[in-house]
Image (cartoon, helix red, strand yellow):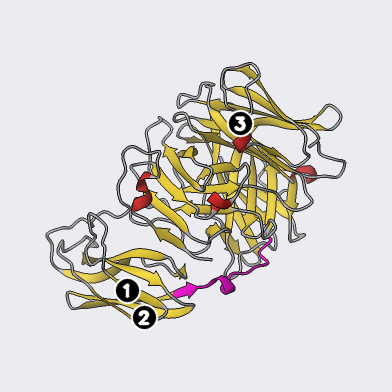
Amino acid sequence: MSRPRVLGSIACVGFVAACSTLIEAVGAAPNRDAVTIILQNVPDSLFIGDSAAVFVQINDKDGRPAWNDTVAVWQSSDVNIALLDPSHPPTPTPHGFTWLYGKRSGQATITAHTKNLTAAKVVTVIGAADIAPGDSRFGYALADQPTAPGPYKPDAAYRFNSSGGDVTITRDSVGWYNVRFAGLARKNGQRDNAQATAFGSPPAVFCKLLRSAIDGADMIVPVHCHQGNAAIDSRFTVLFSGARAFDLTTPFAFALRLPTGQFLSLDTSATAFNSVSGHIGFAWSGVGYYNFQFPGFENFAGPATFLATAVNTTADHCRVDNYTLVGAFVASCFAPNGTPSDGGVNIMQFTRGRVGHRFAYASTNNLVSATPPIDPTLTRNSSGGSVTSRRLGVGQWTITFAGLGRPAGGTEIVIVSALKEVDHSCSLVTWANTGTADLTVTLQCVNPSGALADNRFTVLVIE
């Protein structure tokens, strides 16, 4: 496996008109009373074959950038593990820039010298053999008691924890929750992703994530629900997945874009993964728009689905803005008023579920037909049955998966994501068995003013 690789060329993967490179020059202040050198964008770890654009910033005693002409001399304690090379810089070029390349498994100390100042950091380079192959962690929950302080256990039909431990939910304050998966803490070398969806709430409510946190042996997934700019209590669904939750041949990829402007790209510690080739391309292509690429997915023949959930403390919401079926797509994030916003986003490209367990996903090709046709490139049903849709009215639909009904004693969860169109968000209304063996999901989409509005979507059902 390899770490996220910063790409300048991916900034125009074919579906964004106005694009730019990832890195922008660091601003400067005239105060030259500099006392601190700060290494920028130097990851704790990266995979063999991947790179990071690293640079420096010198701050004065007040923490402000002090020079606009910084030139750094970089050194690696072992160039066979981590190589530094300033060739082919991005435009514009950050002060004190160089590329950091992962060459071989191991650790190397990266050092920058400038203005009689020195800073260093230990970087771990990870190879495929270092990745925990048994990372089958998997869990989900339906938070069905929005005002209960907790901790409480969700309905047994809508919770699962692959460790066999409890799933509990605690409400910290209005609209702020922690979902605890006992025994699912991330171990060294493991990767994971989380997705969330508002459920059964007024149309204008959406739920999002904060970064997952490790607490002893447990994994905590924080969820925050909004109505406009205000926090609001709401039911929601949450899905948590380790890198190897599905069989080793299943194409599966995810990434967390950090909510820190355009300087840092992906979370290079634990939340970026591409099961096919390891590499992940990423570029900032304008405020609120981010391009991702999962090389190797072009070799997978079959439908896929995409999910996107905002990850930050603000009231942003995110969606899949555009996509191709070869592992390249754009995610975009918006403030409640519909303006693009540089927030964090968790994205996932999904192809199959766990072996021997039910799963399905779907999207439609038409927004206004009474029975919108299903998009075959974004639809799959593990039962082998049909997938049909029905438009209930503006911004409201049902998707029925024939033969996917939950059996007695079974469990499942549903996640919805907005897809394409404009600055809308989508959420769950309900889902349940229908007929003799089918499962039907009802969902809705709204515009920035909170009114129901037609919008494409993706919906995932997984056991």
Residue 41, visible in the rendered structure: no
Which residue is at a point 48% across and 25% down the rendered structure image? 447
Front residue of 362/410: it is 362
Vertical position of residue 208 compared to residue 402: above or below: below
Q: Residue 316, position in %: x, y? A: 45, 39
In magenta segment, residue 125: yes
Q: Give the CA separation, mark 1 to mark 2.
A: 7 Å
Q: Is residue 272 left or right of residue 29?
A: right
Of the numbered discs 1 and 2, the one sitting upstream in the chain is 2
Please tell me whether mark 2 sits on a helix, a strand or a loop: loop
Which residue is at a point 65% across and 68% down the rendered structure image? 133
> For residue 58, which quarter of the picture?
bottom left
Vertical position of residue 23 compared to residue 433: above or below: below
Q: Residue 453, position in %: x, y? A: 52, 22
Residue 93, visible in the rendered structure: yes
Of the numbered discs 3 and 2, the one sitting upstream in the chain is 2
The residue singled out by tag 2 in the image is 79
Q: Give the CA separation, mark 3 to mark 2.
A: 49 Å
Q: What kind of residue is marked 3?
A: Asp
Q: Give the CA separation, mark 1 to mark 3.
A: 46 Å
Of the numbered discs 1 and 3, the one sitting upstream in the chain is 1
Q: What kind of residue is marked 1?
A: Leu
Please tell me whether mark 1 sits on a helix, a strand or a loop: strand
Span highlighted in magenta in the image: 124-136
Q: Residues within 10 Å of mark 2 (few under 14, many from 20)?
A: some
